[in-house]
Image (cartoon, grey):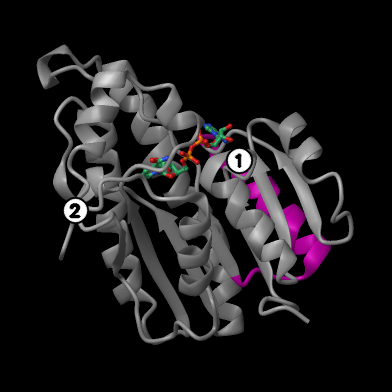
Amino acid sequence: MGNFSKQVAIITGAASGLGLVIAHKLLNEGVRAGLFDINDSILNNEFAGNVLQREIIGLDVTKENEVRDAVYRVVDRFGGIDILINCVGITGITNIRSHEVSTENLQKVFDVNFMSCFYTSKMVLPYMLANNYGRILHISSIAGKEGNAGMLAYSASKAAVIGMTKVQGKEYAESGITVNALAPAVIQTPLVDAMPEIQVKYMTDKIPMKRCGTLEEVANMAAFIVSRESSFTTGFTFDLSGGRATY
Ligand SMILES: NC(=O)c1ccc[n+]([C@@H]2O[C@H](COP(=O)([O-])OP(=O)(O)OC[C@H]3O[C@@H](n4cnc5c(N)ncnc54)[C@H](O)[C@@H]3O)[C@@H](O)[C@H]2O)c1
């Protein structure tokens, strides 16, 4: 019996990076999970085992109707939802100044990074309210706390996620539901690999520990935040930045 047995989670962005390691950790600890990603072939490869424990759903999280249908599928199969972890995210075009940002790109980044967190949390909250229990974790970023030059769309969308976390934390504070965010600095994943080297150097140079965070560090902290034991913290943005943010 793991820490999460008898619990049901939804993890978005589970095919890669942070979502992938968090999903594996929670499955190893007994959770039953809806694994959401636009890339369902990778999900099928990565989670070829765990058949009884997981429901793989390929979807675009920027489409509210697809999110709704996916949440229904998870509830139909597993009977409820205890945990939501939003890991989907894109940087959009980076290493450009604000006057060079295209409206289309900024809108896309907001759709993926912010609207997806709104759609998924809106859909799962009624189930959590009915159960008087829930744990929601939105993966934000240090960019949302501090604002990274060259990353307007990303930083602003992640700040919006932090704003929503504060609101949701307060709104559901008396309902057994916690809503928190996590603000990592740089973790080596395909998202970072795809960024211009100069932008990655800008971000890593700011980390006092002089190293990137590890996927294991992300998974451990995420698992704690969504655990039953983490019960008196809500509306908060947890730090995972090697000392960059001390607030
Ligand atoms: N890696 C870092 O250094 C870092 C730092 C701070 C915050 N974050 C945040 O952590 C989260 C995970 O990042 P990562 O580094 O693991 O990225 P990643 O690119 O490795 O994984 C993101 C996943 O999201 C999926 N995805 C993208 N758009 C989608 C859509 N419209 N619908 C469904 N799925 C979609 C991708 O297919 C991919 O599997 C993101 O929100 C990111 O902003 C990452």
Residue 65 badge: 1
Q: Earlier in the sequence, mark 2 or mark 1?
A: 1
Front tag of 2 and 1: 2
Q: Residue at x 28, y 54 (%)?
A: 241
Q: Residue at x 42, y 56 (%)?
A: 138
Q: Which residue is mark 2?
A: 244
Q: Nearer the viewer, residue 122 or 117?
A: 117
Q: Is residue 148 above or below residue 178?
A: above
**Crowding at mark 1 (Cα within 10 Å: few <14, some 14-19, many 20+):** few
Q: Is residue 96 part of the magenta span, yes or no?
A: no
Q: Is residue 242 above or below residue 5?
A: above
Residue 78 picture location, percent across and down: 79, 66
Residue 202 falls left or right of residue 124: left
* Amino acid beneath label 2: Arg
Residue 168, by quadrant, is bottom left
Q: Nearer the viewer, residue 3 or 60?
A: 3
Q: Residue at x 62, y 47 (%)?
A: 20
Report the magenta stretch's main SS: helix
Residue 236 picture location, percent across and down: 29, 69
Residue 95 picture location, percent across and down: 22, 19
Dot 1 beta carbon under 8 Å from ligand 1: no
Magenta residues span 62-82
Residue 183, by quadrant, is bottom left
